[in-house]
Image (cartoon, coloured by chain):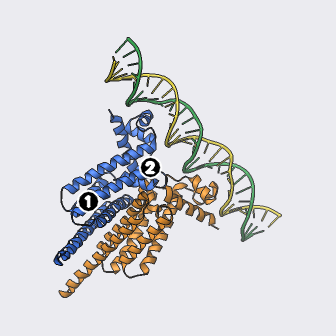
Chain colours: A blue, B orange, C green, D yellow
Amino acid sequence: MAATRDRIIAATNELFRRGGYNGTSLRQVTDAAGAPTGSLYHFFPRGKAELAEAVITETGASYLELFELFAAATSDPGAAVGAFFDGAAETLEQSDYIDVCPIGTVAREVANTHDRLRGAADRVFSSWIESLGKHLEAAGLATTEATALAATVVAALEGSFVLARTRRNADVVRHTGNHMRSLVDAQLRDAHNRAQVNVGRGR
Amino acid sequence: MAATRDRIIAATNELFRRGGYNGTSLRQVTDAAGAPTGSLYHFFPRGKAELAEAVITETGASYLELFELFAAATSDPGAAVGAFFDGAAETLEQSDYIDVCPIGTVAREVANTHDRLRGAADRVFSSWIESLGKHLEAAGLATTEATALAATVVAALEGSFVLARTRRNADVVRHTGNHMRSLVDAQLRDAHNRAQVNVGRGR
DNA sequence: ACTCTAGTAGAGCGTTCGTTCTAGACTCAA
DNA sequence: TTGAGTCTAGAACGAACGCTCTACTAGAGT
């Protein structure tokens, strides 16, 4: 019976997306979750930091699942990337530009002050990069190239959220998605061309 | 004699880069600047928000100048973009991964809660995009393409800061810079090819 | 029927927050 | 020398912060 815990996590997630870590008070969390302080400290004995760590880890895992869903729908990584950006843009517009991703916000905010939170966000980003990287490898990229390109895509995704929130306009997310798609396509084309040349040379 | 005002701005800039808006108290600011509360409210009568607005605007302008410096050094926008990313990576490493850019951090944090700060950050980002966009136009891109590509580059820059801070490793900034450079180069190549075709057709 | 644990409930702790306010010090024109 | 204006200095305010603490309730196990 962890319904209360779930409500606390969900409320914190949404509040972090709106106001970040330091901008969200536990009073807001308990009010939004309809849970008393006692329950909050029952589920998260180390307090706010432990709650934030759980939100980052659990949200990160669910976004990883979501991306895998997009990736499973096609063997073309460029298309999956483009679709993911488009979905994020839609979400932004429908939520009055509340941040799509609490992880990036919190990570940037507390990277220098809360090392455990930084570590949790690091693990989440790494899991995303690894997942996308594997799909890029499967499509023909070398491991090093695939990882670097995956990191760039994640960076562009997070950065486009910053701009979209600031301008209150999600088009930048879509445009960035298109650019990432053509970048992925170009790198895959290069890799295939190189492979062809090597085959032609009897390699 | 606005030396005190300058010290307050500089201290706030650095503290924002470390802890963001809500994570920085005015006590920290006055301590770091060696200025009493009275002086702070003398120069910024509307308090913390006005101070933050000034930091965003002034830092934004100085980064615009910095980019123009990189851009003036070459007629190749791709090279300027790459060099700018490399410079940022260096800065990150030399500063123990304090954020390079207080604007992105603050903007993402308070976009939903402080509209004036959001507006100030919006103007700064727009000025960067406009500047890079003009250089891309000068190199042969159409206005729409140039603006969209410039926005993607700024997004990738901001996003790579998030990842670099979180991983405590600036390589992602360099890799993203390389990818942005090749993206810019590819788009310019496409534009020139299209122009050639049109000339060949007597257009 | 009794005990034990999980979870609910919220008053209250010490601290720090952004801000206000009063008082004093310096500069320079009149 | 005076007076006005600019800037410095920091004590003090009410509000809000994260967190601790004690008391209570519900239900499972024996």
Looking at the image, can residue A14 be seen?
Answer: no
Residue A22 vs C28, above or below: the answer is above
Direction from residue A63 to residue D7 in the image, left or right: right
Coordinates of residue A141 in the picture (x, y in percent):
25, 66
What residue sits right under mark 1 in the picture? Answer: A134
Question: Mark 2 to mark 1: distance in Å?
Answer: 27 Å
Q: Earlier in the sequence, mark 2 or mark 1?
A: 2
Looking at the image, can residue B181 be seen?
Answer: yes
Mark 1 belongs to which subunit?
Answer: A
Mark 2 belongs to which subunit?
Answer: A
Direction from residue A128 to residue A69 in the image, left or right: left
Coordinates of residue A55 in the picture (x, y in percent):
37, 46
What's the mark number on residue A116?
2
Q: Quadrant of residue A151?
A: bottom left
Q: Amino acid at mark 2?
A: Arg
Return the residue nearer the eye: D15 or D30.
Answer: D30
Q: Quadrant of residue A87?
A: bottom left
Callouts 2 and 1 close, C-beta under 8 Å: no
Q: Amino acid at mark 1?
A: Lys
Q: Residues within 10 Å of mark 2 (few under 14, many from 20)?
A: some
**Which residue is found at the position 34% from the left and 46% from the top?**
A58
Return the residue nearer the eye: B199 or A147.
Answer: A147
Coordinates of residue B115 in the picture (x, y in percent):
43, 56
Residue B165 vs B178, above or below: the answer is above
Return the residue nearer the eye: B52 or B187.
Answer: B187
Coordinates of residue C13 in the picture (x, y in percent):
58, 34
- Determine the secondary structure under disc 1: helix
